[in-house]
Image (cartoon, helix red, strand yellow):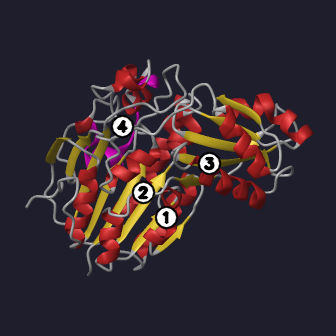
Amino acid sequence: MARRVILIVMDGCGVGAMPDAAKYGNTDPLSATLQHVASAFGGLALPTLEAMGLGKVAALAGVSAKGPALGGFGRCAEQSAGKDSVTGHWEMMGIVTKIPFPTYPNGFPADFIVELEQAFGTKIIGNVASSGTEIIKNLGEDHVRTGRPIVYTSADSVLQIAAHESVIPLDKLYRMCEAARFLADPPNNVQRVIARPFVGDSAATFTRTENRRDFPALPPKVNILTALKTAAKRTHAIGVVADLFPRDYFTTAERTQANAQHLTAIEQAVAGDGFDFLFANCEDFDMLFGHRNDPRGFAESLAEFDRRLAGIVAELRPDDLLILTADHGNDPTTASTDHSREYAPVLVCGGGLSHNVDLGTRNSFADIGATVAKYLGAEWTGAGRSLLPD
């Protein structure tokens, strides 16, 4: 059978602060997402991840480091200047972002807001740095009363537009985001615009829906995905991955929402014959639990992921290569609700890789993309060094 690579990103599942974490926030040096989630409840039962060697990467309560791993285990440092999903996923595909995108802790400049309002045809409310759940609690009723979209940012280089689905329909919200994406390009250079629709009858009941959509800046035109396209490899995106790169970088894409949908899509793809490279993201750890400081929910989500992962591992073909990693941390036990600058675990099995291979600490997330290119026979001379032996 033809070779295939399945890359699954456990969004926000970092394994300890990087040496430069203090540059990225006061709580970042204290962050160790998976370790702290495990210790918060006296340990985790993650038999599939344990078998893949997660306990050998980081000391996690309840996750044993004994016994041989199914394949290779290690962790990756991030070379890019950032701690968010875009820079993390881009670096996996060989794009190292050395110049950080700007952030807006005090809101966006007044002239930029004027441009947004002209493009939207209405005034906005907000223009603050805030948690997404807090902003709709604080400004949602004002938005419903006035019809004005809520514009806000976070610790990342992101412009988010929140709107009640009955006040600003989804198609109109997405058009607003497309207009904002155009304005957010240089010289403003905002990395990502995100549509954040919500529903509910009052501040007490407002909840965000699964109709989020991301509009990132355009990546460089030379990367692992373009190399795979040149090599006529079939690439399939699942989840937010489909929003983090131009859609035409992928042969096919499924914009699934929530881990249950992502994992079902992965299971169905692995059982079929429609890809050479599958690139998937499971975002609930980060979006629902890290950003909301919910370690219990994080732990429960990990347990369910582990259960579903067992079925995926069982269905792997002899020439399949499975890679698990993360794009950043998001420690739910610290005071911060933002991403954290952490190492990403990397677990690899299949593809003829020997058992219990210590991959050590890798210099870059780009090693993952270099592995994909090498295994699938695509030419790549950019960033990264393959995890596989020569």
Q: Looking at the image, which residue is at 38% across and 42% down?
A: 46
Which badge, 2 or 1, is on the more N-terminal residue? 2
Instruction: Between label 3 and label 4, give the one nearer the viewer.
Output: 4
Q: What residue is disc 4 on?
A: 81
Q: Do tag 2 and tag 1 residues touch (Cβ < 8 Å)?
A: yes
Which badge, 4 or 2, is on the more N-terminal residue? 4
Compute the Cα span from label 3 to label 4: 21 Å
Q: Amino acid at mark 1?
A: Pro
Q: What residue is disc 2 on?
A: 219
Task: Please provide percent x and percent y for residue 237.
Answer: 46, 65
Q: Start and end of the magenta stretch?
A: 39-55
Q: What residue is disc 3 on?
A: 194
Compute the Cα span from label 3 to label 1: 15 Å
Q: Is residue 54 magenta?
A: yes
Could you say which is closer to the camera, residue 245 or residue 299?
245
Q: Looking at the image, which residue is at 42% across and 74% down?
A: 271
Compute the Cα span from label 2 to label 1: 8 Å
Which badge, 3 or 1, is on the more N-terminal residue? 3
Q: Quadrant of the N terminus?
A: bottom left
Q: Residues within 10 Å of mark 2 (few under 14, many from 20)?
A: some
